[in-house]
Amino acid sequence: MLQDGFNISAEQANEGLRNHNVDVFRQIYLAYSEELFLLASRWVKDEHLAKDLVHNLFVHLWEKGGSLTITGNVRHYLFRAITNRCLNELKRRSRFVSEDLLQWQADPSSLNEISDYILLQKELINHLQGLAPRCREIFMMSRVQGLDPSEIASKLGITLNTVYFQLAVALKYLRTHMKGKKG
Amino acid sequence: MSNDDIQEFVIDCITDPENRDKQAALDKWLQESEENRVLYAEIKRIWDIAETVPSTPFNKTEGWDLLSQHITGTPVKVRKMSGWWRAAAVLVPLCIVAAAWWQYSGREHKESEWMNFVAQGAEKDSLLLPDGSKVYAKPGTILAYNKQRVVKLEKGEAFFKVVQDEKTRFVVQMKTAEVTVLGTSFNITVDSTLTDVAVWDGKVSMARKDGETIVLKEGEMGRLDKGSLNKMTGNYAYRCGWANGYLIFENEEAGVVAAILSKYYHVNFTIADSLVKKRITVRFRNMSFEEVQTVLAEVLDK
């Protein structure tokens, strides 16, 4: 399991929610909202919807805080909550529900794996900021927008070799920076 | 292979999955040791995780602001407006704006009336034309425009970002030349002897006043010099850089690149004599001068 960097116990969270303690609520939001957004984006494949779902989850926590009881790990509780919301929303909209989402429901132990994945992704996003802007742009075009190296080359008016070179620079950087923090 | 070379090799294979030779070499290398397989898995994992990174980063501060509006005081239920009210909420202000606009524009100037514009400021000035097209002009540039997509450029340098309108051509008239487009961006420089038109995107038709016409595409530049109209060789997209922040050089001499960067960043940027003639391909956008220096050093070093 990766390091949280932030830990709030279920008891603290429950008490904060019950008392409508804005500070505790804010801490929870700042600690977990991005991860929840990443997870929701992964399930619903729609960034706007993912953002709304995260917002709604927190509104719900605030409004129903008194009657909710978080047990166990706060992150896992929230991950489950957002996943259920995603699933319901996908069903409501009669959208396609992916295999791994259904599998997750059937087998809650896959949560650890997903949790690792999301935390690693969050870390990667952080480190992207450390890349030179041009290098980051090329990396994002390749990965996020899914463009072929040749498409990137023609779009940016640069050589194919430059694209490969920049991708290598990006990967090398990310690997070196993400390596130290594992385990 | 050194550690760095291995990394390079693996990355090369991952980024080029279509290349069979590379994939074969990769397979062979993976067979060699467990260590190799671990290294490969690590890099591949980063590569795969990056694929599902959202295109716009999540903004916690913004999200919290929105949320705290929602929760301050007693929890407030946001009631959803019914369809009619929602439509009205959008339409009524729109109608008011439209009505005001009609009144205002009717009084202001007639369709064919010319408005004059002289660019001010230290770096650049901008102007929004009645059709929504945007003009960036260097200080001292003089032009006039009307509401029928016609601009008269007297002198100076201006970058035009023209909104698409299939029905009405956008025309820039100069003393000796005329430029016609539908919707594109391009840069025009006019001085006493030369008229240069460099195209950022789309197609532009450039004509001499007495008839001869050339069509310019992305990156191309037409020049009217003492009555002769020519298409210049090379990529001139960088000519638009001062206005749109992109500086693109394709197979350009390093000396030329340095001269343009010096002008753009208002610094004296020099490079070693031995490298002045070296041709480079490089692209910058809204980068600080320090970043540009780093990238350039890297490119020249290769």
Image (tube, coloured by chain):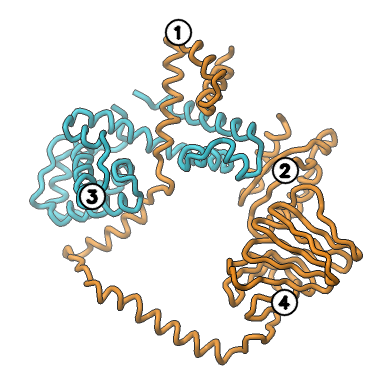
Chain colours: A cyan, B orange
Q: Amino acid at mark 4?
A: Val
Q: Amino acid at mark 3?
A: Ser
Within-10-Å neighbours for mark 2: few <14, some 14–19, many 20+:
many
Q: Position of residue A55 (x, y in %)?
A: 26, 54
Q: Quadrant of the C terminus of chain B?
A: top right
Using the rendered image of the protein, determine whether residue B43 is visible from the camera's viewpoint: yes
Residue B138 visible from this viewpoint: no
Circles 1 and 4 in contact, beta carbons < 8 Å: no
Residue located beneath label 2 in the image: B250
Amino acid tagged 2: Glu
Residue denoted by label 1: B33
Residue extending farthest to the right is B226
The three-letter code of the residue at mark 1 reads Ser
Which badge, 2 or 1, comes first in the chain's sequence? 1
Q: Secondary structure at mark 4?
A: strand
Q: CA distance from mark 3 to mark 4?
A: 57 Å
For marks 4 and 2, the one nearer the N-term is 4
